[in-house]
Structures are given as structure tokens and as C-alpha cells.
Amino acid sequence: MQPLKDEAATIKAEVIDLKEQLKRLKRDRANDADIDACMATIGNKEKSVRELEAKVAAIDAAVFDLKAVNPKAVAKVDNRTPQQIIKNIEDQGLIVSAALARLNILLANGDVL
């Protein structure tokens, strides 16, 4: 991972130098071909820096994965169909309605404070 970081840092330094060169070219009103070539070189080097940094990040994520995961945990999967889920929701709704009706009766009779 470190060699990739070092290479990216080297290329970043080159990009800084190229940007200074581009400023001088623009200030000196150089021809458009030189300016375009310099800009293309900067773009290519910046792209390679991004690629190197992506490789570094991928290596870092693979090597230093510190997630707290229980390897013995069993994943629960719901294999019900949408119709079965809807039916279950309706059944649970009936249970809640019945409980609320009973609670209202108890409250009306004064049995519950």
C-alpha cells in the first residue's frame, strides 16, 4: 500500500509543477496548442492519482476491516409471500382491536385505574 501512496504523492507533486507551468503559459499568452497539451497532461496525471488513491483505499478496506460481526450469527430470512405478510398484519390488527375493545370496557366499568 505504501508504494502506491508514494507514487501518488510523486504524481501530485508533478501536477503542482504542471499547474505552475500552465499559469506561466497563460500569463505569457502562449499558443493554444501548448496550453491544451499542458492541460491534457494535468488531466491524465490527476486521473492516475485518483486511480492510485482508489487502489490504496481498496487495499486499506480489505486489510483493515474492523467491523464487529459475529461469525456464528444466523441470518433470519423472511420467506413469506406478500399475501402472507398482509394476512399476518390483518391478524395482528384484529388482536390489537380486540385488546383495545376489552381495555375500553374495563375502563368504562372502572376496573382499571
Image: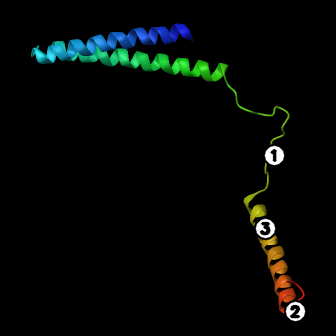
Name the element at disc 1.
loop
Q: Nearer the viewer, mark 3 or mark 2?
A: 2
How far from the left and from the top, in percent, is residue 107? 83, 87
Pointers 3 and 2 in contact (C-beta within 8 Å): no
Name the residue beneath numbered marker 3.
87
User: Looking at the image, which is closer to me, 46 or 76?
Assistant: 46
Q: Amino acid at mark 3?
A: Lys
Q: Identify the amino acid type marked 2.
A: Asn
Cα distance, mark 3 to mark 2? 33 Å
Residue shown at 34% from the left, 16% from the top = 44
Circle on res. 60: none
Mark number displayed over residue 109 = 2
Q: Position of residue 71 (x, y in %)?
A: 82, 31
Circle 1 Cα neighbour tier, 10 Å, few/some/many (<14 / 14–19 / ≥20): few
Q: Quadrant of the N terminus?
A: top right
Please name the residue that numbered disc 1 is placed on. Answer: 76
Left of 69 or right of it: where is 39?
Answer: left
Residue at image coords 87%, 87%:
106
- Residue 62 higher or lower than 84, as above or below: above
**Labels 2 and 1: the sequence-earlier one:** 1
**Disc nearer the start of the sequence (3/2):** 3
Asked if 108 appears above or below 100 in the picture, the reply is below
Residue in the picture at 79% in, 51% down: 79
